[in-house]
Amino acid sequence: MTSIPGKPPNSDTYFDQAAFTTPEVTYEDIHSDNPVEVTPSKIDVAENTVTETPLLNTTEVRNITDFSNLRYREELNAVFKSMAMGSFDHQLRDAMYGFDRFDKNPLPTNTEYIGYTFITRPTLNLQDPSLNMDRYFAPLKTNVPNSMAYAIRGLLDCYWASTQPNISHSKLLDASMPFMTPLSNALLSISGFQDPVMETQTTPTGFHSEDFTAALGHDYLNKTYTLNLTFTDYQYGPILAIFNYWFRYIANVLKNVQVAYSDDINERRLNYTCSIYRFVMDPRRRIVTGYAKATGCIPVSTVNGAKFNYGENEHYISSSGKFTIPFTVNKLEYDDFGILMDFNRLMDNFNPKVATAPVIPNKAHFNFKGYPYIDTSNGHVELQFRHVPNN
C-alpha cells in the first residue's frame, strides 16, 4: 500500500489509534448546570468489536467544542502539520512569518459584510416664511406629528425639528438621530468610490529609447466625484418625496427664492449638503473593518419625470419602486481615524447621553432600535447600537 503523508501504512485512520464515537449531545446537555454524563464507545478497528469504556468525562466533551482541551489541540496540530498546513493554533503567524513551500495557503479568504451606510441630515431652512415662498412646499406646512409631511420636514431641517414642542409625539421622526434613517434603510446599492491613484511622470526617451518614471504626487481625493445611490421606495413614495423637496430647495436658494439660515450665510456653509459614512463590517456585523466618508454631497438629479413615462404592456411604473440618485461629492476619505471621531462627535451633538448609554444586544429582537456609536476601548473599532432612555 502506498504511504500517504500523515497516514501510517495499512491503516484506515489518520492515526494508529482507535476511533471514537459519541452519542448525540444536545445544547442543553453541554450548557446545563447538571450536564448528562456521556460515555462514548470505543471501536476496535482490528477486531471490529465495540466496548463501552468511559474514555471521556463530561468536562472533556465540553472542552472539545472550543478546542481548549490540551490533548485534542495537540492532535489537531499534528494533523495540520502532517498535511503541510502548519500549526492549527498559529496559522496566521505561520503565513506572516515563513514561506509556504508546499503552496497550501491554509488561511481562508478575507470575508467582509457590506456593512452600513449613514447619510447625515441637512439643515434646509423650512420655517413657515420660507415655505410660503414656493407653493411646491405647501404640503410640508403641517404640525401633525405623525404625518409623513411632518417627518420629511423634520428630516430635512434639523433646526426646525429641534424647536418643535410636539416632536416627541412623532412616531415617524427621531429628532435625536443625526442620520436620515429612511434613506439608509431603503438604500439598495452605492457605487462611485474611487481608488487612490499615484500620478507618475516619465522622462523623454534617450538615444537608446530608455526612459525613467518617478512618482509625481497624489491628490488625496480632493476632487469632485459622483456617487450613485440606488433606493427602493415605499408605498406612496416618501423616499422620492425627500429628494424632490431637497432638490427644489437647492434650486430655490440659488435663485434667492428661499434663503438659508443667517448663521449658515455668515459662516459661508452650504446647508443643503450632507455627508455619507460607509462602514464595512466583519461577518458578525460587530467590528468595523473599513470606514469611508464622503463630504459635501449634493443630490444633483431626481426621477420625478421618469415616473410619468410608461411603455407598451406596462401597467406599473418601475421607476416608482426603484431609482438611482447621483450625488456630487467634494471630498473622499478612507480609513482615517478622524472619520470615527467625526461620527461620534456628530452623535454627541444630537444626543449627549449616547456616550454613556448601555449597549443593545446584537439580536434580531432589537432590530430598528438604538443609536449607532463607535467604541475603540477594546483595541478594535466596534460599531455599537446604544439605548438612550426617554428618547
Image (cartoon, helix red, strand yellow):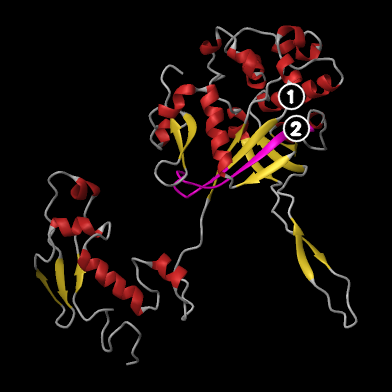
Q: Secondary structure at mark 1?
A: helix
Identity of the residue furthest to the right in this view: 207
The residue depicted at 78 percent of the width and 69 percent of the height is 213
Does residue 317 show up? no
- Viewer can see residue 305: yes
Judging depth in this view, the residue of 320 and 310 nearest the camera is 320
Across and down, in percent, residue 172 comes to 56, 19
Q: Which residues are magenta?
A: 279-301
| 229 lies above or below 153 | below
Instruction: Give the vertical position of 233 relative to 99 (above or below).
Output: above
Residue at the spot 65% in from the left edge and 43% down from the top edge: 189
Question: Which residue in the rendered view is the most extreme toward the bottom?
Answer: 1
* Residue under label 1: 246
How packed mark 2 is, by other alpha carbons closer than 10 Å (few <14, some 14-19, many 20 or more), is many
Q: What amino acid is found at the position of numbered circle 2 in the picture? A: Pro
What residue is at 78 percent from the left and 8 percent from the top?
A: 132
* Nearest the eye: 149 or 41: 149
Relative to 21, 329 lies left or right: right
Secondary element type, mark 2: strand
| Label drawn at residue 299 | 2
Residue 304 x/y as whole percent = 79, 28
